[in-house]
Image (tube, rainbow, N blue to C red):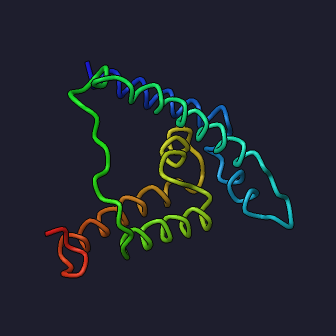
Amino acid sequence: MAFLVNLALGLLFGVGLIVSGMSDPAKVLNFLDLFGTWDPSLALVMGGAVLTAFIGYRIVLKRARPIAGGGFHSPTKNNIDARVLAGPAIFGIGWGLSGFCPGPALTAIGLGATGTLAFVPAMIVGMWAARFVVETHPLTSRA
């Protein structure tokens, strides 16, 4: 049952990305081009997502447990370290250079969008490399 719920939510997310135009890297690049062809639609989509998540969390967390799961899994750490700063910085640089972030890239590869054939494999290698560094480097290991 949980698999079907997750599948439906993933499909809903993908459809939302396509309908909002966020699977098009030009949208992101135009949002970052403040003094050229600036397009505020990314900020509007982001604002809508933040508002929806804010309301959704207020409603859902009043429940004793999730509908399709044993319990809620909230973060337990609240400290800011080098990993917390480096990860989002690398993510943001990649997003700004390519115009893709992971969700829209996976949606766009399904649509046959150019650029995703290079971006998605590079993203997978980067995710693997990050996990390898975290697990093997003494300064970043979780042990």
In the image, taking residue 59 as reference, residue 111 lies left or right, namely right
Residue positioned 39% across, 69% down in the render: 80
Count up the numbered dots.
0
Residue found at x 49% / y 55%: 117
Q: Residue furthest left?
A: 143
| Image x and y of residue 36, in percent | 86, 64
Q: Between residue 79 and residue 42, name the one nearer to us.
A: 79
Up-down relation of residue 47 to residue 56 (above or below): below
- In the image, is residue 7 above or below residue 74? above
Given the current orientation, which residue lies at the most extreme bottom position? Answer: 138
Q: Is residue 142 left or right of residue 88?
A: left
Which quarter of the rendered picture does the N terminus lie within? top left
Residue at x 70% of width, y 59% of height: 29
Task: Estimate the x, y position of residue 41 in percent, counting from the top left.
Answer: 75, 45
Image vertical order of residue 118 relative to residue 40, above or below: below
Q: Is residue 138 above or below residue 109?
A: below
The spot of residue 57 in percent (x, y) is 46, 33
Residue nearest the viewer, comparing 30 with 73: 73
The image quadrant where one finds the C terminus is: bottom left
Residue 97, given in percent of the width and then of the height, sits at 61, 68
In this view, the residue in front, 94 or 143, is 143
**Residue 39 vs residue 76: left or right?**
right
Identity of the residue furthest to the front in this view: 62
